Image (cartoon, helix red, strand yellow):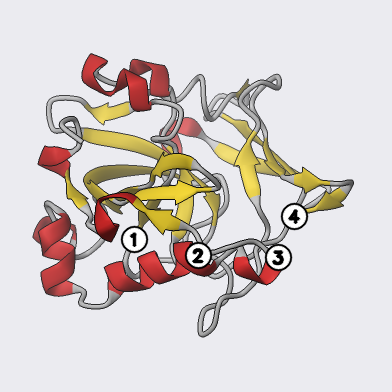
Amino acid sequence: MNSVFGSNITINPPALTVRQNAEGKYISPFHDIPIYADEAGNIFHAVVEVPRWTNAKMEIATKEPLSPLKQDVKKGNLRYISNVFPHTGYIWNYGAIPQQSCLPLELQEFQRSVSVFFTCLHQVCSRGEVLRVKVLGTPALIDEGETDWNVIVINVEDPEAEDFNDIEDVCRLKPGFLQATLDWFRMYKVPDGKPENQFAFNGEFKNRVNRAAA
């Protein structure tokens, strides 16, 4: 975890998590953490909302004071993602890139949906953890009629990070990972009685260099 941004305080777990910086002051994980960890190197910050293999649907409440991490509520009930065989919960660490309004101009039209990431091919992160990540690519998920660009990144502190620079490296070095990602996104709402999700570009992942053109 990036200690510059302090630590998390969980209140009434797992429903609410707030953040303190290294000076003990409460901060917003969305508005107070800069989008770039190293702009020249295209290294971004990312905040973990949902640790790998967990089911609670946690999100940064961007419109609330201090933007706490809160469990989503639907019809008065806390939301949990159903298991999709053979997986348990989310198959990656899942979260948000902060300060998306600071994205390059060519990505402004995508800013609402460039909000999630999958990272750390080996690590199970902690909720609220702040990572330094590099972007590898993205699929274009059609979720209930809306396009979500779900950004695939890797933690720069991952022991294999130097080997991964684009989506083709994921295909080459981690066979099956991207197909499992497509399968999970296609099926994850089916246990709740909803239809399978679809993908633009026939499920083709777009490389980091193609992202603005997509």
Residue kind at label 3, given as amino acid type: Asp
List the residue tagged with mark 3: 192
Residue at 34% over, 17% down: 102
Indicate the position of residue 78 as horizontal and vertical percent values: 80, 53
Indicate the position of residue 108 as horizontal and vertical percent values: 33, 19
Residue at 61% over, 68% down: 190
Name the disc covering residue 52, or none. 2
Going by the image, does 150 lie left or right of 32? left
| First along the sequence among labels 3 and 4 | 4
Name the disc covering residue 81, or none. none
User: Rounded to the nearest whole Å, what is the CA distance between mark 1 and mark 3?
Assistant: 28 Å
Q: Are marks 2 and 4 in contact (CB under 8 Å)?
A: no
Residue at 22% over, 36% down: 43
**Which residue is more in the foreground, 84 or 145?**
145
Residue at 54% over, 30% down: 29
List the residue tagged with mark 4: 79
Residue kind at label 2, given as amino acid type: Arg
Q: Are marks 2 and 1 in contact (CB under 8 Å)?
A: yes
| First along the sequence among labels 3 and 2 | 2
> Which marked residue is nearer to the observer: mark 3 or mark 4?
3
Asked where in the image residue 41 lies, by quadrant, the reply is top left
Residue kind at label 4, given as amino acid type: Arg
The 10 Å Cα crowd at callout 4, few under 14, some 14 to 19, many 20 or more, is some
> Which marked residue is nearer to the observer: mark 4 or mark 1?
4
| First along the sequence among labels 2 and 1 | 2
Going by the image, does 128 lie left or right of 149? right
User: Rounded to the nearest whole Å, what is the CA distance between mark 3 and mark 4?
Assistant: 11 Å
- SS category of the residue bearing label 4: loop
Indicate the position of residue 21 as horizontal and vertical percent values: 55, 28
- SS category of the residue bearing label 2: loop
Q: Are marks 1 and 3 in contact (CB under 8 Å)?
A: no
- SS category of the residue bearing label 1: loop
